Image: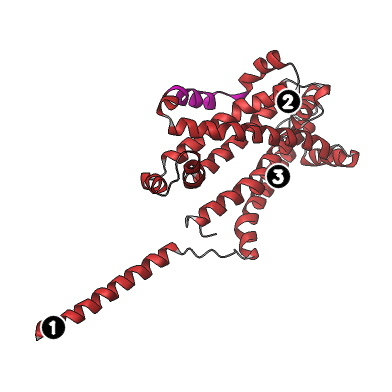
């Protein structure tokens, strides 16, 4: 009699434990993604970099007032601002910036189209990995400026030489980023994909790339950084009136004219474009991917 009474109670407890376990797993799987309030965004995302920039300007101004060096070596911030205002009033500022940005983005898209399948090939074919893996790592550590003389000899002082330098600088970073992301994909995902028929190109599209997305995006960010640096090096060295006036050539022209405010302005514009592209394109993309995986809450 006692046995018949305790069995249902034990069964109810087991059912309750199972229900609690399922509820806990559901709670872990459901990631609450909430839009960050504007006030919090301004406080935590906008205010710190603005404060840092103001501090740099304040230190710069204090150094000028203290006369730590000659004016032609460290001009007043107002002189740099005057140069920026002059470019804006002349209508050449946006043209200079767009000349370089359009080259950089086009070269990056080409590097993306080459680096992605190359990374997949290296990650999934052991023989290709053994042959090309060390070469890609070596190319990634090679300064992009080293390719400029060779590109000029091969292709002349043309846009083709600029794009060649960008590709040689960015493709290894994108490919290595994808390889790193694929190496971190759990084997269980691949087996599950094969079980459901996702093999070959379908498996790469529906299993490998989505699972490796965080590492892939990190490689894209690094690839853009290499693209931008490579382009600036090419524009500095292989400057020509036929190529149009980009940021690198503007910087070189200012150096030739011993125009230190122009030099600093060119450096600041190059820095600004690099930061802006990261904040507008890559950081939101990275946050979105991390949110969908429950790795970021805001």
Chief secondary structure of the magenta portion? helix
Residue tagged 3: 57
Residue 4, numbered circle: 1
Task: Mark 3 or mark 1: name the one nearer the start of the chain.
Answer: 1
Can the viewer see residue 71?
A: no
Q: Nearer the viewer, mark 1 or mark 2?
A: 1
Out of 171 and 72, give the one closest to the viewer. Answer: 171
Measured along the vertical axis of the image, is residue 116 above or below residue 48? above
Which residue is at a point 49% across and 35% down the rendered structure image? Answer: 120
Residue tagged 2: 235
Residue 32 x, y percent position in the rendering: 50, 65
Which residue is at a point 42% across and 47% down the rendered structure image? Answer: 193
Residue 286 x, y percent position in the rendering: 56, 49
Residue 214 x, y percent position in the rendering: 50, 46
Task: Mark 2 or mark 3: name the one nearer the start of the chain.
Answer: 3
Task: Choose top left, top right, bottom left or bottom right for residue 198.
Answer: top left
């Amino acid at each position: 009699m006692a046995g018949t009474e305790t069995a249902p109670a034990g069964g109810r407890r087991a059912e309750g434990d199972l229900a609690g376990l399922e509820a806990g797993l559901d709670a872990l799987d459901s990631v609450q993604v909430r839009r960050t309030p504007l006030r919090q965004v301004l406080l935590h995302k906008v205010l710190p970099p603005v404060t840092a920039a103001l501090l740099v300007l304040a230190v710069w101004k204090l150094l000028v007032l203290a006369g730590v060096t000659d004016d032609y070596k460290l001009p007043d911030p107002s002189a740099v601002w005057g140069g920026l205002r002059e470019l804006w009033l002349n209508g050449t500022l946006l043209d200079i910036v767009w000349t370089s940005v359009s080259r950089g983005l086009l070269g990056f898209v080409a590097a993306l189209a080459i680096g992605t399948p190359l990374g997949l090939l290296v990650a999934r074919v052991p023989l290709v990995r053994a042959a090309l893996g060390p070469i890609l790592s070596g190319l990634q550590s090679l300064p992009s400026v080293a390719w400029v003389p060779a590109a000029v000899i091969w292709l002349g002082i043309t846009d083709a030489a600029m794009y060649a330098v960008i590709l040689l600088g960015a493709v290894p970073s994108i490919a290595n980023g994808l390889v790193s992301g694929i190496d971190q994909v759990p084997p269980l995902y691949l087996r599950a994909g094969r079980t459901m028929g996702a093999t070959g190109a379908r498996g790469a599209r529906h299993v490998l790339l989505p699972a490796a997305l965080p590492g892939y995006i990190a490689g894209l960010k690094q690839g853009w950084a290499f693209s931008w640096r490579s382009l600036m090096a090419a524009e500095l060295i292989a400057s020509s009136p036929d190529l149009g006036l980009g940021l690198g050539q503007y910087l070189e022209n200012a150096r030739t004219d011993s125009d230190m405010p122009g030099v600093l302005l060119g450096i600041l514009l190059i820095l600004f474009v690099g930061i802006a592209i990261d904040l507008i394109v890559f950081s939101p993309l990275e946050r979105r991917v991390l949110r969908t995986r429950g790795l970021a809450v805001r």
